[in-house]
Image (tube, grey):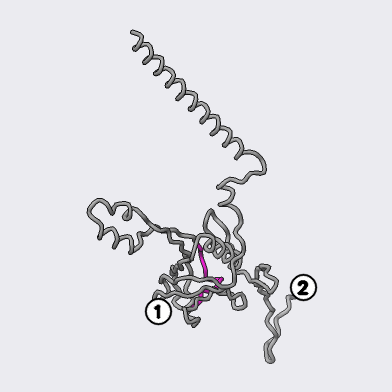
């Protein structure tokens, strides 16, 4: 009987300990949430929506296709503000092609998860079942995807460039949107139908060009018959 009482007492003590630990953990979680909501603290959502820093004039990028006549290639992307275009050069720094700012319809940051080739090879060399963790491993790749109007073919095209990391992609996307006069919509930049092509001057400010049409009355040519004047009634 005494042994049964001792077992019951130990079980109750264990239950009370678990309940106490749960209460302490809940209080700590509540305090942590409260601290995150205090003024002056920065949450992950606030960091993600912060304005990225300006992109450098040239960044490393891999052209993934989309422009007629050019195969995939490693190289660099450069902001050529003088000629208002996004310029791509290969690894030898030879200019291959460019996309004018004013023909860009939209610019999007795209992320794709792909399994590295090395992981596939290693998983195949390991006995069945042991290579499963390697097959689950995937690396995220960051892409700058542009939709544009091809000035040569008068048709729309889509091209993409792989960036080194998400910070570089965010800076390039934001900088391109500002230079091309695009409007931010969510995580993308688009050209609104009522947007006129913009120009960036030497100081970096953006101005909108408008065209004014004036009508000149026809000039009287020699030999023209004089117009009849209305006679008073």
Q: Is residue 140 left or right of residue 179?
A: left
Towards the viewer: 204 or 16: 16
Tags 1 and 2 touching, CB below 8 Å = no
* Disc 1 residue crowd, few under 14, some 14–19, many 20+, Cα 10 Å: few
Q: Secondary structure at mark 2?
A: loop
Distance from disc 1 to disc 2, alpha carbons, whole Å, reads: 74 Å
Q: Residue at x 61, y 61 (%)?
A: 53
Of all residues, the one furthest to the right in this rendering is 232
Q: Residue furthest front?
A: 2
Relative image position of residue 63 (x, y in whole percent)? 44, 72
Relative depth, front residue between 101 and 211: 101
- In the rendered view, tell whether residue 9 sits above or below residue 83: above
1 or 2: mark nearer the eye = 1
Front residue of 174/151: it is 174
Per the image, the residue denoted by label 1 is 69
* First to last magenta residue range: 97-107
Residue 183 location, quadrant: bottom right
Q: The C terminus is located in which quarter?
A: bottom right
- Residue 25 colored in magenta in the image: no
- Decide whether the magenta segment is chiefly helix, strand or loop: strand
Q: Which residue is mark 2?
A: 232
Residue 94, given in percent of the width and then of the height, sits at 49, 83
The N terminus appears in which quarter of the rendering? top left
């Amino acid at each position: 009987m005494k042994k049964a009482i001792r077992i019951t007492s130990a079980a109750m003590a264990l239950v009370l300990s678990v309940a106490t630990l749960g209460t302490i953990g809940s209080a700590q979680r509540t305090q942590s949430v409260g601290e995150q909501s205090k003024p002056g603290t920065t949450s992950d959502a606030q960091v993600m929506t912060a304005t990225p820093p300006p992109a450098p004039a040239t960044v490393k990028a891999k052209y993934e296709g989309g422009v007629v006549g050019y195969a995939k290639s490693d190289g660099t992307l450069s902001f050529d503000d003088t000629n208002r275009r996004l310029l791509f050069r290969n690894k030898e720094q030879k200019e291959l092609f460019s996309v004018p700012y004013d023909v860009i319809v939209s610019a999007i940051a795209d992320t794709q998860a792909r399994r590295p080739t090395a992981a596939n090879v290693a998983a195949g060399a390991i006995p069945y079942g042991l290579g499963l963790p390697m097959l689950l491993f995937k690396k995220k790749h960051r892409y700058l995807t542009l939709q544009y109007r091809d000035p040569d073919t008068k048709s729309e095209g889509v091209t993409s460039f792989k960036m080194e990391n998400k910070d570089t992609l965010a800076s390039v996307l934001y900088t391109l949107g500002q230079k091309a006069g695009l409007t931010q919509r969510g995580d993308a930049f688009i050209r609104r139908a009522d947007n006129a092509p913009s120009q960036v001057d030497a100081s970096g400010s953006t101005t909108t060009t408008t065209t004014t049409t004036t009508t000149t009355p026809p000039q009287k040519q020699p030999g023209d018959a004089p117009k009849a004047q209305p006679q008073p009634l």
